[in-house]
Image: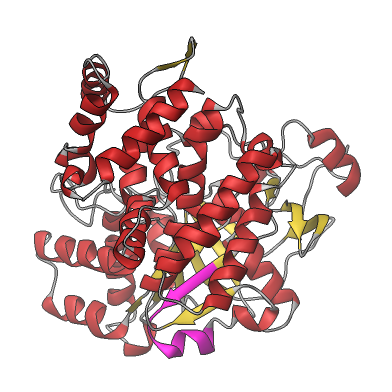
Amino acid sequence: MQALSRSAFPPSQRPVKILQFGNGNFLRGFTDWMIQKANQANVFDGDIHIVQVHSKSGSNPMKEQDCLFHVIEQGPKKGELVQEYTLINCVSGITNVFEEYDEYLKLGENPDLRFVVSNTTEAGIVFDPTDSSADHISKTFPGKLTALLYHRFKTFKGDDSKGLIFLPCELIEGNGEALKECIQKYITFWKLPMEFSEWIDWKNIFCNTLVDRIVPGFPKDSIEEVQEKIGYKDDMAVMVEPYHFWAIEGAHAVKEEFPLDKAGLNVKFVDNLAPFRTQKVRILNGGHTSMVPYAYLKGLRTVKEAVENPEISSFLKEAIYDEIIPTLHMPQEELEQFASDVLERFANPFIVHELKSIALNSISKFKVRVLPSLLAYYELKKEWPEKLIRSFAALLVFYKGNYKGIETPVNDNPTLMAEFKAAWELTTTEATVSKLLSERAYWGEDLGGYEGFVHAVTDAVDKLLKA
């Protein structure tokens, strides 16, 4: 089968406007796909140059395919199952920072460059004091970026118009602010000119963002069918769900220069990301986290199995609509539409998402994703939410490590797991629940102080153990 190449798909004449740090599945199935759609809709006119920041050497299938690849959307979309293929040709080149450091720095000399996009994992936006100077390859992404920005600053002699717009996609709160802070730390640590620091502060825009799309990645189980459909060998194909969302906080000028929403994409430019982050964490992540232990105890092993099970499906819907949404301060219509999208996404038949993988570190996840809704509901209604209490009980039973003779795949901090094991060796269920709910290290507070809480959870635990 013929390989993808520019001989079959000639390069565009678009200027390179975006520098992308990271070549993983997410950015290719999210940002690159969006830029492709925006170019095709004639609302944007720009290509992407990718910087590899992790891989130090080895083969580069992106180069071998002339930076061409396909994104395959599979799943429910407005009530119908879709399967759409998009050829991505907006990536014009790729540079490995370790193998081509001088060439990497020269990317900053591009007068058309306007945006920097990144996804270097949640641990990627950090400062490392062992990075000695801008003349050497830094260990961290912010260090590498600072060196390039300083080269750009010197090349254009501090030209005000050559500042950039930063759109980090790392899943940390305040990602744009965190990136800017790290860059300023490197400037101070490396004793770079004050004029450069001021240029970073005043002539560059660092946006906080929130991204959402499930990207399973290379469709290894169906690649032959995919390649038969597209007619080319593609070792960089990326499978994604149809749903996508990108919220960008900050200057309204960004919307004018980056009008992806005009291409019909689900991109919002907002003054405050907090409500959208809360909505995602409480409904999407909270729905996942509240469902998983209960579904697993019921003998189910994947999200698909869980949402197709009448009892679990009803449990999940009632938890979201009756107990989580009432605690959120956003327009009801928006919350219900988001919840509807979430339930549709959970039912995607093309994505096999194992419950045991979602159950990783469930205590810390429950604390952030579900507990705030549970406590807010009590504050609002002066009664405990039945479904979320049952979920909490299922979580404690799941962490027992064994349910009706079947081992539960608990995967968490070893010390925490040992503490749970010890608590479950106490003589009564109430003693176990009281002990676990009182642990501030787990929940951030002593939950035993809430009136009727220990009793409500104990009762739910007993029902599960006797079921």
Q: Is residue 304 left or right of residue 159?
A: right
Q: Nearer the viewer, residue 9 or 380?
A: 380
Compared to residue 280, the image places residue 462 above or below, namely above
Q: Position of residue 346 (x, y in %)?
A: 64, 48
Q: Is residue 406 left or right of residue 418?
A: right
Please say whether residue 429 is one of the residues in the magenta stretch. Answer: no
Q: Nearer the viewer, residue 394 or 172?
A: 394
Compared to residue 60, the image places residue 152 above or below, namely below
Residue span colored magenta: 246-257
Q: Nearer the viewer, residue 444 or 361?
A: 444
Inspect this view and state whether residue 248 appears: yes
Exactly how many numbered labels are in the figure? 0
Q: Is residue 257 left or right of residue 14?
A: left
**In terms of image quadrants, where is residue 61?**
top right
Q: Position of residue 191 (x, y in %)?
A: 9, 65
**In terms of image quadrants, where is residue 185?**
bottom left
Which residue appears at 60% of the width and 57% of the height?
342
Inspect this view and state whether residue 361 appears: no
Compared to residue 30, the image places residue 47 above or below, namely below
Q: Position of residue 421 (x, y in %)?
A: 27, 17
Q: Nearer the viewer, residue 213 or 295?
A: 295
Which residue appears at 44% of the width and 22% of the height?
465
Please say whether residue 251 is one of the residues in the magenta stretch. Answer: yes
Q: Position of residue 224 (x, y in %)?
A: 84, 34
Q: Is residue 193 left or right of residue 260?
A: left
Colouring scheme, one of rainbow, by chain, secondary structure, one colour: secondary structure
Quadrant of the drawing holding the N terminus: top right
